[in-house]
Amino acid sequence: MLYGNILTPAGWRLGTLDWRDGRIVTLEGEAVDPDANDHPRLLPGFVDLHVHGGGGADAMEGGDAAATMARTHVRFGTTSLLVTTMTAPVSDIRQALRDIARLIDESPVQASRLLGVHLEGPYLNPGKLGAQPPYAHPGVIEEVEALMALAPIRLLTLAPELSGHAELIRLLRERGVRVQMGHTLGSYEEGVAGLAHGAQGFTHLFNAMTGLHHRKPGMVGAALAHADYAEIIPDLLHVHPGAILTALRCIPHLYGVTDSTAAAGMPDGEYRLGEQHVTKCLGGVRLADGTLAGSTLTMDQALRNLVQIGLDLGDACRRLSQYPADFLGETEIGRLEIGCRADVVVMNARLEIDAVYVGGELAHQASATSREQTTTRAAGAPRESH
């Protein structure tokens, strides 16, 4: 049983939270302003739908990389995630998917829950790859179905303007796969058409897509005008706080992702992102030419960043838990209410993690030394990333 300020879908309560067999059975308390006391904040576990790596491991390595990622990110409050692949030769993607599928079945302990795969590429526009390797090509339905047979692909990023992708979007929608538009040179009109065909969101909004101009609204304009959901990277490097606030006014269920790489949770140095060599320094990850290449962001820092730019804690938390869960169609995670999974992040008043529970099992207990925060700050104007 836990006691503290509990964030429920209906608002904050000061009271007790208990579970049995991994699910919440008791949630009692009275309405409260969490800023009025120093009791712990009990938050729903964070749900990250865009994770390339962590703890030195990269999803495309295969083997046990996804387990290492999951054990790393749970320390920062992520209780569920999608393992995210990179553009690569299809044979490499196949092998990575086989290994990811095995680890999903094995369910690593003291780790984030592996919900499935986010296939980011290879069905991207070759002219907007960012940090993605140069293996992009239009999607062919037979190839996509063969990949789906290897692992549970829950989310797929593609460029809607490529030949055959309207039909592909419709097929994926029928198969229950969420489609986001990204790494695209598509116009506003092509973005609107993608939504009409069945795409539901946008990948790392603002990054690796055509920007907003008052006579050419671009893919960003399509998102701001029409999207209900879109993901964004709130590391304050990929997107200026003003742009985040703009998107928040336009997109009701804007949600945060880390787009984290193997460098997440690791010291500065050299790491892999797919077949690319990247360097972690100055709070970010870059290719040799300075292009941002994923991030070092963790979800607890994403929460602090959103609060820093003006969101109240409840709103910031929902954008890292409930909204991504809803987007994926997961109704038993990302929220604290009776019957849901007991995925709980315990934070102190400074929004530092004290403990993380996954399905009611203690997955991480913070020590005093582990609370040292690594706050990312924008350092100049980075080059356009993926």
Image (spheres, helix red, strand yellow):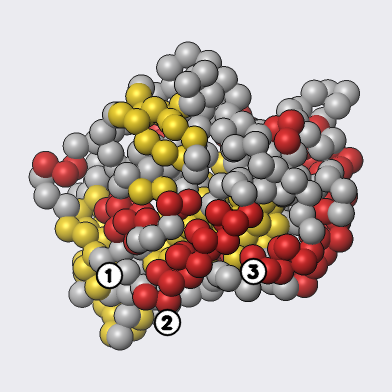
Let me know if residue 39 appears in the view.
Answer: no
Verify CB contact (< 8 Å) between mark 3 and mark 1: no
Helix, strand or loop at disc 3? helix
| Label 1 crowd bin: few (<14), some (14–19), many (20+), radius 10 Å | few
Q: Amino acid at mark 2?
A: Gly
Q: Which residue is mark 3?
A: 148
Give the labeled residue for mark 2: 339
Kindly report which numbered mark, 3 or 2, lies closer to the viewer in this rendering: 3
- Near mark 2 (Cα within 10 A), the count class, few <14, some 14-19 or many ≥20, is some
Q: Is residue 202 above or below residue 240?
A: below
Location of the N terminus by quadrant is bottom left
Farthest residue, direction left: 368
What's the distance in space between the residues labelled 3 and 1, CA to CA?
Answer: 25 Å
Please report the residue visible at 65 percent of the width from the left and 36 percent of the height from the top.
134
Looking at the picture, how far across and down is residue 191, in whole percent? 82, 44
Q: Amino acid at mark 3?
A: Met
Label at residue 109:
1
Q: Which residue is nearer to you in this view: 267 or 18?
A: 267
